[in-house]
Image (spheres, rainbow, N blue to C red):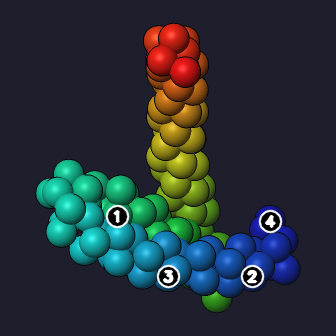
Amino acid sequence: MVDKENLKELSKWAGFVGIMTIIFGAISAIGGLFAFIIGAIPGIIAIILGIKLRNTKLYADELLAGEQDETKLNMLFMNLNTYFKIQGILIIISLAFMILGMLTGVFAGFAFRHIF
């Protein structure tokens, strides 16, 4: 049903990336608290993403242990689905801010060209 080698690799990398995302998310959230309260939001989102990856590892390990349950496989995919949805939304927001920043730079350049 499930390729054990690929599932083992998924478990290993999801665990590592999940732990690192949680650690850096916590550092980001604590650092963001010192700037503004709203500055902690990216860190909190990163912690949530890390938890989703850790849950993916948990379900992958359970599948590797021989518990061939369809609900565990569905939960694994549900956690990955949520992870990728949040990442996709963050990418779209980043692209929007990038385009907005470029347009602001271009318009500011035109507005201040007569000074130089």
Q: Which numbered disc flags the more N-terminal residue, 3 or 4?
A: 4
Label 2, label 4: how far apart the Cα atoms are? 14 Å
Residue closest to the eye, 37 or 64: 37
| Looking at the image, residue 74 lies above or below residue 92 | below
Q: Earlier in the sequence, mark 4 or mark 1?
A: 4
**Disc 4 on helix, strand or loop?**
loop
Q: Which amino acid type corresponds to the residue marked 1 in the rendered image?
A: Gly
Mark 2 against mark 3, which lies toward the viewer?
Answer: 3
Disc with the residue nearer the chain's start (1 vs 2): 2
Q: Which residue is mark 2?
A: 8
Q: Nearer the viewer, residue 96 or 44?
A: 96
Q: Amino acid at mark 4?
A: Met
Say whether marks 1 and 2 touch (CB < 8 Å): no
Decide which of 87, 41 is in the foreground and name it. Answer: 41
- Give the answer, above or below, for where 52 lies relative to 16: above
Residue with the mark numbered 4: 1
Residue at the disc numbered 3: 19
Label 4, label 1: how many angstroms apart (C-alpha)?
Answer: 37 Å
Give the residue number, with chain letter if any, for mark 1. 43
Q: Is residue 99 above or below residue 83?
A: above
Q: How far separated are the C-alphas under marks 2 and 3?
A: 17 Å
Mark 3 crowdedness (10 Å alpha carbons): few <14, some 14-19, many ≥20: some
Q: Which secondary structure, mark 2?
A: helix
Lower sequence index among marks 1 and 3: 3
First-in-chain label (2 vs 4): 4
x, y (%) of residue 94?
Answer: 52, 39
User: Separation of disc 1 and disc 3 at Cα?
Assistant: 13 Å
Badge 4: few (under 14), some or many (20 or more) residues near its Cα, within 10 Å? few
Tag nearer the camera, 4 or 1: 1
Question: Quarter-wise, where is residue 56 in the image?
Answer: bottom right
Q: Which part of the image, by quadrant, shows the C terminus?
A: top right
